[in-house]
Amino acid sequence: MPARIAYTAAREIAEHAAREAPKEACGLLAGRSGHISHSLPVRNLAPRPEAQFELDPREELIALKAIDKRGLELLGAYHSHPDAPPIPSGEDIAGAVDDGLLQLILSLDRSAPRLKIWRIGDGRVTPVELIFEDQSALVDDHALSRFQELAVVIAGLASLFILLALALALLPPAPDLSALP
Ligand SMILES: [Zn+2]
């Protein structure tokens, strides 16, 4: 089953990662029924934060309470790779427990940050399809994406121009005014 993430949550994770670079940023993912709607930053307490992450247990507890208070579910955790692709490292795999939670990794190693989401547990790593949604799409699954809306507008304009061209081509020639008395 694919995971869904709100653009706002993805943007907040990217901003957090950029702020913390060259250290890894980390935090929790929350939402409802598999839709990630919120990201909650947590301090990275790892001894080598440039290459690993470890959630500060005190801040993690505060984030968990905030998730509970908003009536959301804990869906997973995120962290950044400042100069590596968004693929789980050996340490990420060794440190993960198979608890059904999603592991999101954001990479800053290219000009555009890239997000990938995984399930990691028992030494096994499974990629999870990630779908980006805006907040309105979280409310209505059938809402058109911005791109689809644009495509519909362009198609509408194109058919209007074709109709206009046809109408002009079918018009009778202009009357010859010089022939009038
Ligand atoms: Zn990692």
Image: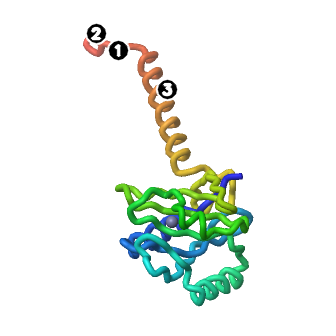
Label 2 is placed on what type of residue? Answer: Ala
Q: Which residue is mark 2?
A: 179
Q: Residues within 10 Å of mark 2 (few under 14, many from 20)?
A: few
Kindly report which numbered mark, 2 or 3, lies closer to the viewer in this rendering.
Answer: 3
Name which of mark 3 and mark 1 comes first in the sequence. 3
Q: How are the colours assigned in the image?
A: rainbow
Q: CA distance from mark 2 to mark 3?
A: 32 Å
Asked if marks 1 and 2 touch (Cβ < 8 Å), the reply is yes
Q: Secondary structure at mark 3?
A: helix
Q: Image point 37% across, 13% down: which residue?
A: 173
Q: Image point 54% across, 60% down: which residue?
A: 88
Q: Position of residue 167 (x, y in %)?
A: 47, 22
Query: Which mark identifies residue 175?
Result: 1
Q: Which residue is mark 3?
A: 163
Closer-to-camera residue (46/33) = 46
Closer-to-camera residue (27/57) = 57
Query: Which mark identifies residue 30?
Result: none
Q: Secondary structure at mark 1?
A: loop
Q: Residues within 10 Å of mark 1 (few under 14, many from 20)?
A: few
> Is 65 placed left or right of 22 in the picture?
right
Q: Is 38 situated above or below 69?
A: above
Q: CA distance from mark 1 to mark 2?
A: 9 Å
Q: Position of residue 4 (x, y in %)?
A: 63, 58
Q: Secondary structure at mark 2?
A: helix
Asked if marks 3 and 1 touch (Cβ < 8 Å), the reply is no
Q: Which of the image's four quarters has the C terminus?
A: top left
Q: Is 181 situated above or below 147?
A: above
Quadrant hosting residue 85: bottom left
Q: Position of residue 33 (x, y in %)?
A: 74, 64
